[in-house]
Image: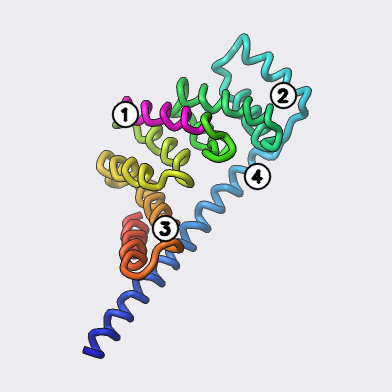
Amino acid sequence: MRKNNIFKFVSICVVFIGAIFLTIKNSTYIFNKGIHYIAGNRGNISEKKANKLEEQLLSNPGDLNVREKLLKYYFRHSKSESSRKKKQEHVRWLINNHPESEIAGHPYAELNPILDKSAYSDAKQLWLKQVESNKSNVKILMNAVNFFTLFDKDLCIKILKDVQRITPNDDEAYRKLGHIYSLEIRSSHGKSRKKIAKQALDEYEKA
């Protein structure tokens, strides 16, 4: 009996440590991607420039380069209510019109259910509509996952499993799902923690 208990304990430790190791490895990967993105997008703009860019969009609303600059500006000035409102408008526009775009999957295009309140709920419904209408579009599905990662993990898991079925060789989908599971480890306990750690480990190993 004692040997069985020791074996179970060792097994749990191996799974848990393995999950932690791969979580750190994955976090480094995500961090490096973030640093690369920021390094290539350091430029900030003034309020005057932001206003001029908003005027440009009136005649050319589909200019994603301009929208990206504005989203970065409003992201950096998110303490201002007016900036948050503007950011919310641009996020909704992106989801409606270009959910497949690269910028739609960046942190600048994410909203917070506490700070953005009803705007987050509106954006969530727009993303759910896009997911339902574009079940085989991996880019759109992954952008939706990025939007929901921090605040709706169950939905992320569901979407990522769909992506894995569509593209079983997509390392990013497995890596992302492993990351989602790893976020749950801290708040879990006992058998639940062991199960989640194993799930994270399994996904990372597939990537």
Where does the image place residue 177, in percent across and percent down from the top left? 37, 51
Looking at the rendering, in which quadrant would you find the N terminus? bottom left
What residue did someone put label 2 on? 50
Q: Earlier in the sequence, mark 1 or mark 3?
A: 1
User: Which mark is in front, 3 or 4?
Assistant: 3
The structure residue drawn at horizontal position 57% and vertical position 34%, both measured from the top left corner, is: 116
The residue that label 3 is drawn on is 184
Residue 132 shows which numbered tag?
Answer: 1
Q: Secondary structure at mark 3?
A: helix
Q: Which residues are magenta?
A: 119-134
Of labels 1 and 2, the one closer to you: 1
Amino acid at dot 1: Glu
Residue 199 vs 41, above or below: the answer is below
The residue lying at 35 percent from left, 35 percent from top is: 138
Whether 189 is among the magenta residues is no
Asked if marks 3 and 4 touch (Cβ < 8 Å), the reply is: no
Label 3 sits on what residue type?
Glu
Residue 159 place in picture, x, y as percent: 33, 40
Q: Secondary structure at mark 4?
A: helix
- Answer with the quarter of the image where residue 70 lies: top right
The earlier-in-sequence mark between 4 and 2 is 4
The answer to which of marks 1 and 4 sits earlier in the sequence is: 4
How far across and down, in percent of the image, does residue 143 sit? 44, 36
